[in-house]
Structures are given as C-alpha cells and as structure tokens.
C-alpha cells in the first residue's frame, strides 16, 4: 500500500521537476533574446593552459574597440576556475550591478563590457569547486541574465582544453561565428591543438583560425631573434589541418608587465610589433566574417530562388 507521505513526496517531486523545466525554458527564451542583440560571438580556445589565451582575448577585444567598435565589445570570461580577464583589464575587485532587467557587466577600458566569475567571488583566495552541471548553469546565466545590450562582438574566453565550459558555450550558442585557437609554437602544444580543432569540427563550429603566441623573442639590447618555444609551429599545424592561420604574436616582456598592471598592451604599446600583429589579426577576423556573411547571403538567395521556381 502506498503511504500518504510517499504520495505527497512524489507529487512534490513532479511539481519541482515541472518548475525546473519551465525555468530552463524561460531562461532559454531570455538567452535567445539577449544574444540576438550581439552581432558576432567568437570563442577563444586553446588545447592547454598558459599559452596566452586570456592575453589574446583581452587584447583582441581592445583591438576591435580601437578598430571602430568602441563601447560595442564584450568579454565573457568563462574560465570559471581561473578567471584572469578582470586583472588584465584593471577592473579586479569590481562587482556586477543588479537592476530590474538583470545584472550589468563591468565596464573596462574603451568601454569593453566584462562578465567574470571573479566579480562574484568574495575573496582573492576563494576557489570555485563545482561540477559540470553547476558550471553549465552559471554560463547559461551569464549569457541570459546579464544585460549585455547591443554589441558588435562578444568574445568568450574559455578555459584550456575541451571540458564542460567549452561544451556548454558551444551548445548554448550554436549560432557562434567561430573559434580562434591559440597555441605556442612547440610540438607539445601542437598535439593538443589537434584536439581543439577536432572538438570544434565535431560540434560544427567554424574555425576562424589559429594564432601562434610566444612566437620568438627579439632581444631589446641586440635585436637578435631567439625562438624560445621554436617558431612556425602554428603555421605548420594550420597547413596540416587545413585551418586558416591568423598570425604570430612574439614574446614581449611588456605584454606580461602590462597584463599584470591591468593595462591593455595594444593601447600602451601601439607601435610595437606585437601590437601590430594584434591589429593584423583583427583584419583577418573581419575578412573571415565578411566572407561568411557573403556565403550566407548567397545561400539565402539561392534558396529563395529555388522556392520561387
Ligand atoms: P592562458 O589564458 O592561456 O592560461 P595567459 O593569457 O594567462 O594564458 O598568459 C600566461 C602568462 O603569459 C601571463 O602572465 C601573460 O601575461 C604572459 N604572456 C602571454 N602571452 C605573452 C607574450 N606574447 N609575451 C610575453 N608574455 C606573455
């Protein structure tokens, strides 16, 4: 015989389940509305950590702002366990401000709008100890409940590898323009780049291209070039895998110094060869987007012609 208390707990469970389903559906609707106002979404990924993915994300966002998109660029720092974008852009210690419409990003240099787990942690040493579903839910909320507004670009800085966060972002944003893959020239790094390329291909996300970071060091004293992590590995892997190569960024001690101080390198040292390399990458990404738009328009025209014939 089913006890009265069992019956009650069954009906409560089913009510909770229905409520949870409704919440997700509502959240999904909000996510679609909010994300429809962002023209381009680009994720920055790397096979392994420490290759400069966050530095590249922060400086690309600033470089795009300088390239006619000031106050129209956002960064979602989706590295839940090791968020560094706020530190690199000098906005560490700030908090997301809530309003009736949702929470607002923190405005960084050149009006770059930033959302990061770092803004939600009470102290510097607080680690985030979460399993996959909780991380997925946090990323979903970052995309849906933040008032991103009308943006030209949203850059998503993903943690290294092909784990939960990367999968969540790709699944939540299937309309994403594509991914930029960051590597260093060494062979060790190239092996993991292959995994990142396969990951994007399996999820049907376009690969905008590969950036080779830490590509050689030019001695400021004698002008000699030292290939500390070798060089040309990024180009080689691009050719091997049939993926566009976006450019190389040299090792420049000022990149590290500026990032530590919270100053964007591309505005601090605009004449350096590394800053020029960033601006060239911006142009390559813009060409990729232009080409993608033209292809989509051609497909749309062809399909409407087919429809009318
Ligand atoms: P990731 O996000 O891949 O883990 P980061 O962007 O945090 O890597 O970079 C790791 C460290 O290397 C940081 O201290 C950063 O300032 C430094 N760095 C990254 N790229 C360069 C570069 N091209 N020249 C000098 N230092 C760099």
Image (cartoon, helix red, strand yellow):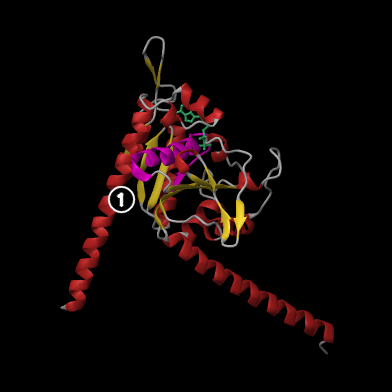
Percent of width and height locating residue 251: 43, 25
Figure label count: 1
Magenta stretch holds residue 64:
yes
In the image, farthest residue toward the front? 100
Say if 141 sits above or below 25 in the image.
above
Q: Quadrant of residue 261?
A: top right
Taking the image as shown, residue 144 lies to the left or right of residue 211, namely: right
The relative height of residue 200 versus residue 303 in the rendered view (above or below) is above
Q: Is mark 1 within 8 Å of ligand 1?
A: no
Sort mark 1 into few (<14), some (14-19) or many (20+) by Cα contacts within 10 Å: some
Q: Position of residue 293 (x, y in %)?
A: 27, 56
Q: Quadrant where the C terminus lies?
A: bottom left
Q: Secondary structure at mark 1?
A: helix
Quadrant where the image shows the N terminus: bottom right
Residue span colored magenta: 43-69
Q: Is residue 145 left or right of residue 224?
A: right
User: Would you say the magenta stretch is mainly helix, strand or loop?
Assistant: helix
Question: Of 261 and 291, which appears nearest the observer?
Answer: 261
Q: Quadrant of residue 226?
A: top left
Q: Tell whether 126 sits left or right of 96.
A: right
Q: Which residue is at a point 46% across and 35% down the rendered structure image?
A: 189
Residue 72 locus on image (x, y percent): 41, 48
Q: Is residue 16 magenta?
A: no
Please provide percent x and percent y for residue 264.
47, 32
Looking at the image, the residue that sits furthest to the top is 222
Q: Which residue is mark 1?
A: 289
Left or right for 154, reference 119: left
């Amino acid at each position: 015989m089913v006890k009265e208390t069992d019956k009650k707990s069954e009906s409560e469970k089913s009510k909770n389940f229905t409520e949870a389903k409704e919440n997700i559906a509502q959240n999904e609707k909000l996510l679609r509305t909010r994300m429809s106002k962002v023209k381009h979404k680009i994720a920055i990924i790397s096979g392994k950590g420490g290759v400069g993915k966050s530095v590249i994300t922060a400086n690309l966002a600033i470089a795009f702002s300088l390239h006619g998109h000031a106050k129209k660029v956002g960064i979602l720092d989706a590295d839940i366990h090791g968020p560094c974008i706020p530190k690199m852009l000098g906005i560490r210690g700030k908090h997301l401000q809530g309003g009736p419409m949702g929470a607002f990003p923190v405005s960084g240099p050149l009006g770059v709008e930033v959302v990061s787990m770092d803004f939600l942690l009470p102290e510097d040493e607080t680690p985030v100890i979460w399993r996959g579903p909780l991380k997925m839910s946090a990323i979903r909320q970052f995309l849906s409940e933040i008032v991103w507004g009308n943006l030209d670009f949203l850059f998503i800085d993903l943690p290294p590898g092909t784990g939960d966060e990367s999968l969540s972002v790709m699944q939540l944003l299937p309309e994403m323009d594509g991914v930029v893959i960051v590597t260093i020239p060494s062979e060790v790094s190239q092996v993991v780049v292959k995994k990142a390329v396969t990951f994007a291909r399996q999820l049907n996300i376009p690969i905008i291209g590969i950036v080779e970071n830490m590509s050689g060091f030019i001695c400021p004293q004698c002008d000699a070039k030292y290939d500390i992590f070798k060089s040309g590995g990024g180009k080689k892997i691009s050719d091997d895998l049939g993926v566009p190569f976006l450019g190389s960024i040299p090792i420049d001690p000022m990149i590290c110094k500026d990032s530590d101080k919270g100053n964007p390198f591309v505005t601090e040292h605009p004449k350096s060869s590394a800053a020029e390399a960033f601006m060239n990458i911006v142009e390559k990404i813009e060409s990729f987007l232009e080409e993608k738009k033209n292809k989509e328009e051609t497909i749309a025209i062809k399909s409407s012609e087919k429809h009318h014939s």
